[in-house]
Amino acid sequence: MSLLAATSLLLSGCAAAVAPAAGSGTVPSSGPNASATGYPVTVDNCGTAVTVSAAPERIVSIKSSTTELLLALGLGDRIVGSAFLDGPLPESLAADGANLNVISDFLPGQEAVLGLNPDFIYGGWQSNFSADGVGERDALASLGVGSYVSPAACKGEYMPRPLTFDAVFTEIAEAGTIFGARPKADALVATLKADLAALSPKTTGTPTALWYSSGTTTPYVGAGIGSPNMIMTAAGLTNVFETVSDTWTSVGWESIIEADPSVIVLVDATWNTAASKIAYLESNPATQVLDAVKNQRYIILPFASTEAGIRNVEAVSATIDQLANLSG
Amino acid sequence: MTRGLYLGWLVAGTLALILACALAVTIGPATVTLTQVAGSIGWHLGLSAEPGAPVLVDAIVWQLRLPRVLTAALVGAGLALCGAVMQSVTRNPLADPYLLGLSSGASVGAVCVVILGLTFALPVAAFLGALLALTATLSIARVGGTITPVRAVLAGLAIAQLAGALTSFIIFWAAKGDSYREILNWLLGSVAGASWGSVTIAATALIVVGTGILLSATRLDAFAFGDTSAASLGINVNRTRWALLGGVALLTGAMVAVSGAIGFVGLILPHLVRGISGPGHHRLLPLVAVFGGLFLVIADTLARTLFDPRELPVGIITAFIGVPVFILLIKRKRSHLWA
């Protein structure tokens, strides 16, 4: 509720104007406005047919992106357990998530998850559903436990190429349909769309940027078709690796130095802080010469806001704001 | 093989190594002209008063490519040399520089510091881990002050398994998010992070320990005929074995510290080169060092350019090139191999 309350101004202005964005794979049985009563719902999720006959009541959420979306949809009381969170909840969801049952900081095993007696598992990564993770999807289905993976994280032919904000919004709407909160999902999408539309880059031109996720000897950077490129493009930046057809990729420093990006976007995670990356960039003789390093033109984003989800718009906004405050 | 033919191989190999290094510095994802490469290196060596390249190009040549190419050459030479010695000392064709648990021990040290976020301390931690593993292996293998090859191999196997489990456990216990990626890169072995510090470490170890190993060629020859024969040739078998294992451990530890556990070079190169030089160590050791360096320089150059701008782990290339060559050798030159 608090997220909606905080943005109620925008909501009242825009919600009515936005048509529900039905997921491409979503086939609600009772028309495009299927809500909590619109079951059964069948979706093609990363190649797995998921049929939900009633709104899941006991959900386990894996990773931050899924947990935050459920909380934003007001479904916090249906989450029986969460795990593998990437960082703290954003302020807007802190109250909703205060009673969250976090069962592990890591990916839990099948038994730990099944012990919670869930009827549905919502995973942020496809790899979460493995025999040594929360379980194979088929095996879970045979136990009567439904599963759903963030479509942005699908692999192979189901991977969005490239990921767009429309795809992120479609995912939110589809999750709304599956979890029986479609009206709220539509309202959330409307808010996010309005927020995104209200943002405009304050820079002149499109400065080049490097998305530096992790790694020292072989840096792991944002490539052309994933959420890093989506966020950078929306913030008026040109990703120096936008031509690499991958979500993230490993590159050599040589390519980065040759590109000499105008700014460097640093992902801040507890296990790999932005500060540690800055320290590395400024101590390595090879990277010291970079224009962005010499002028300390860094943009810092929390890890959990950088994976496809409800915080991507906030990441764009943060990027634009930080960009405006950088020295020339 | 005649002495002349052998010298021909050695000179040709050395020239090829120098040429490969020079060429490798001019190749890379970034567009850098020959003039800029020469200008940058010339300026740093004090041969010209003016910087010969723009500051970014200069950084690419002097801070990235040159130290990386030199590290690859030194590490390749060191690992090949260590592999040749290990195979002789343990009389085991499957021996490689990591036989005594060295790389596994180094991995434990490396994983600890990466998990703690102290990446800068990685070389020191890896080296200490390698030495710790070696000490453990040798103290298990030692019975009444003597070490037999079989006991050393088995003790190394035990320590390697234990250290491997320890590494996996630390990753399982502590790796959050994508921090496993950094560890994985290191475990696969790579000279991507080479700096002038790496060059200094690798060069010092290779010169100091490598010289000692080259001077031990006669003793290594004697080992080929077994401990009893070696003893009858007036060699203190036990002391020599301790000294050689210790030397190899120091050199391998230094190499692992700068590049992680690059596989294959130390195992296959000695077999390949033995096919050219014959089993005598006076000929084998210098040639294996030269070809080891040449091999890794070529493999690493391919690793960083084939999928530009992406980088391939060098271990994939070493196996893709080395295995077919090795298979050919098994087929055609059986007499030069061990079996």
Image: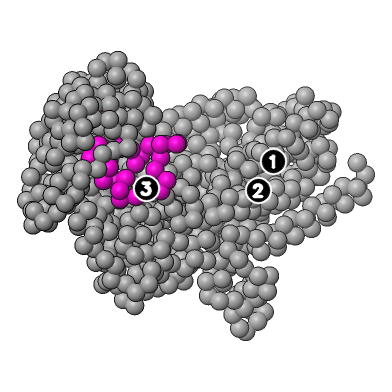
Disc number for residue A273: none
As measured in the structure, the alpha-carbon distance from the residue carrying label 1 to the one carrying label 3 is 37 Å
Which quarter shows the C terminus of chain A?
A: bottom left
B89 or B104, which lies in front?
B104
The residue type indicated by label 1 comes to: Ile
Which residue occupies 77% across, 55% down? B16
Disc number for residue A163: 3
Identify residue for label 2: B299
Would you say residue A194 is visible in this rendering? yes
Identify residue for label 1: B321
Magenta-drawn stretch contains A34: no
Camera-side mark, 1 or 3: 3
Which residue occupies 77% across, 41% down? B273
Would you say residue B127 is visible in this rendering? no
Labels 1 and 2 positioned on one and the same chain: yes
Q: Chain of mark 1?
A: B
Which quarter shows the N terminus of chain A?
A: top left
| Range drawn in magenta | A147-174
Q: Dividing the picture into quarters, in which one does residue A105 lie?
A: top left
Say which element carries label 2: helix
Magenta-drawn stretch contains A168: yes
User: Which percent across, then down, holds residue B6?
Assistant: 87, 47
User: Which percent across, then down, holds residue A166?
Assistant: 30, 48
As measured in the structure, the alpha-carbon distance from the residue carrying label 1 to the one carrying label 2 is 8 Å
User: Which percent across, then down, holds residue A295?
Assistant: 37, 74
